[in-house]
Amino acid sequence: MGQPACIDDSALDRLRRQGGPVLVREIVKIFLEDAPQRLLDGRAGAKARNLDATRRAAHSLKSTAGALGAVELKAVSEQIEELAADNQGAAVDALLDRWDASFAAAERQLSAVIARDPA
């Protein structure tokens, strides 16, 4: 048995209907290039106790993850965004590894989308 799906394929299907597989590939590629920096920015903000920077990074990831159907990444990003807005640094810190792991899982599945969707 493989890993559970962390991507809601219906979100990708909606994007395909709106703009075709080329649009999906481009959005996914941009997301996969951009997201690691957002994670680094969020982690750096948490470390420096600049929780506004963490909140902005989480908000950015939440929005795009939601559009791509990355449900776990969206959920963790939303939690971090809310906690950072409430200035709960210790609670943010407790979620950072889960944030990274949820991105890694989404990255694996979204990379497979790029590989299987026609250009």
Image (tube, rainbow, N blue to C red):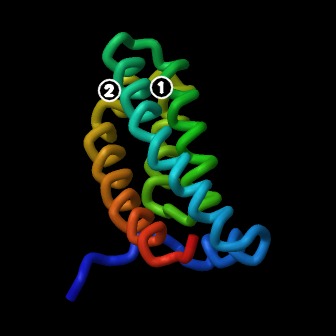
Residue lying at the far bottom in this picture: please name it.
1
Q: Amino acid at mark 1?
A: Thr
Taking the image as shown, residue 109 lies to the left or right of residue 63, namely left
Q: Is residue 71 above or below residue 97?
A: below
Which residue is more in the foreground, 51 or 106?
A: 106
Q: Secondary structure at mark 2?
A: helix
Percent x, y of residue 38: 46, 33
**Which quadrant, please, contains the N terminus?**
bottom left
Q: Amino acid at mark 2?
A: Ala
Q: Residues within 10 Å of mark 2 (few under 14, many from 20)?
A: few
Percent x, y of residue 47: 31, 17
Q: Mark 2 or mark 1, which is nearer the start of the sequence? A: 1
Q: Quadrant of residue 19?
A: bottom right
Percent x, y of residue 23: 67, 62
Residue bearing the label numbered 1: 54
Which residue is more in the foreground, 105 or 45?
A: 105
Q: Secondary structure at mark 1?
A: helix
Q: CA distance from mark 1 to mark 2?
A: 13 Å
Taking the image as shown, residue 42 lies to the left or right of residue 78, namely left
- The numbered mark at residue 81 is none
Residue bearing the label numbered 2: 90
Q: Is residue 99 above or below residue 116?
A: above
Which residue is more in the foreground, 59 or 15?
A: 15
Q: Residue at x 45, y 49 (%)?
A: 32
Disc nearest the viewer among 1 and 2: 1
Q: Residue at x 47, y 67 (%)?
A: 114
Q: Residues within 10 Å of mark 1 (few under 14, many from 20)?
A: many
Percent x, y of residue 3: 26, 76
Taking the image as shown, residue 58 lies to the left or right of residue 91, namely right
Q: Quadrant of residue 39?
A: top left
Q: Is residue 48 above or below residue 78?
A: above
Residue lying at the far left in this picture: please name it.
1
